[in-house]
Image: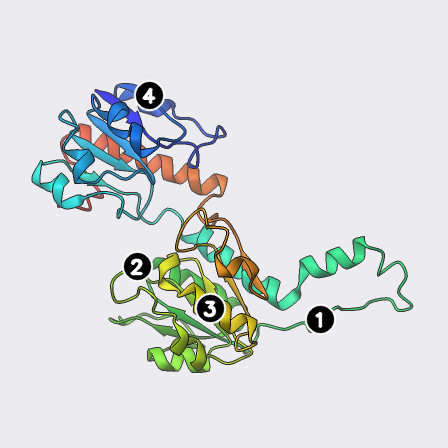
Amino acid sequence: MKIVVLDGNTTNPGDLDWGFLTQFGECTIYDRTPRVLTVERAKDAEIVVTNKVVLDREVLEQLPKLQFIELLSTGYNVIDCDCARERGIPVSNIPAYSTDAVAQLVFAFILEFCNHVSVHNEAVKSGEWTNCPDFCFWKTGLTELGGKALGIIGFGRIGQRVSEIASAFGMRVLAYTPHPKHLDMGPGFSWASLDEVITESDFITLHCPLTPQTEHMVNGNFLQKMKPSAYLINTSRGPVVDEAALAQALNTGALAGAGVDVLSTEPPKADNPLLTAKNCLITPHIAWAGFETRGRLLQICKDNMEAFCAGTPIHVVNP
């Protein structure tokens, strides 16, 4: 089989091994593929591997040999799954590989807001501790997490892992999902309505999928209901948040801060209002990018390829 990886650089910039692909056939790996080259590079492929390169109907109809699409992501919105289904082409994604990594970044944001490590590190390096008359000083208020309320919107694997970590910090957890299930999440946990999460939480973290119902769910009305002392964390999907409304809330002091790993357009445009908003921490979509996490991703990719070649594809998103 001929295999083409269209955009392998973000998944594996050189610290992991693509060698496993050669057991399935002849493999060509591109770091990046602009749309104008997608068909040219994939036209003879029987298996196409993609992360963010779009395979819409226009492209798929020009790939006559294609038999299988392997995603390097959990999300599959870059694929026209209906078109692939019509042609009998299974599309497999990479589920549940980044749960711990995403939960870890949520608390990296939260702890930065509570302990202000970067602010104090910079102060020490600039000589403020050396010249201080006391044995310690702090630049801004420090906060304990114990007893604080963490609102979790979306309660799949990642939301549940975040809840477990919050419990270890002694936080109260208010969880919202449209379809709550009976789960024993321990003391301090309770289901809540969306309004209760918004109005009662000291921190709100988003773990919901992007759907027509959740797009711009965090809008001006949502933000006005939050405590002015509260913080918003988004590691889900950028368009869940109305970025202009969030920037306004931050700049006017209606919200204490925000930590976001995802934006509506990535890379962001220079005029994205969050780039200049007050107390807004932004990371470049790295929650999934730990070495161990990406290694797990490639192992699931290998499992998907083996299953397809055996005639029993798994993790199929277009059955």
| Residue placed furthest toward the top | 26
The residue where tag 2 is placed is: 210
Type of residue at label 3?
A: Leu
The residue where tag 3 is placed is: 246
The mark closer to the camera, 3 or 4, is: 3
Type of residue at label 4?
A: Thr
- Image quadrant where residue 20 sits: top left
Residue 191, position as x, y percentages in the image = 34, 77
The residue where tag 1 is placed is: 140
Q: CA distance from mark 3 to mark 4?
A: 42 Å
Q: Could you tell me if residue 30 is visible in this image?
A: yes
Q: Secondary structure at mark 3?
A: helix
First reached walking from the N terminus: tag 2 or tag 3 = 2
Callout 1 touching callout 4 (CB < 8 Å): no
Q: Could you tell me if residue 163 is visible in this image?
A: no
Q: CA distance from mark 1 to mark 3?
A: 23 Å
Q: Secondary structure at mark 2?
A: loop
Residue 277, position as x, y percentages in the image = 55, 64
> Is 154 in front, or is 51?
51
The mark closer to the camera, 2 or 3, is: 3
Q: Tell me which residue sits at (88%, 58%) in the image.
A: 130
For label 2, the crowd category at 10 Å Cα-Cα, with few meaning under 14, some 14 to 19 and many 20 or more, is some
The residue where tag 4 is placed is: 28
Q: CA distance from mark 2 to mark 1?
A: 36 Å
Q: CA distance from mark 2 to mark 3?
A: 17 Å
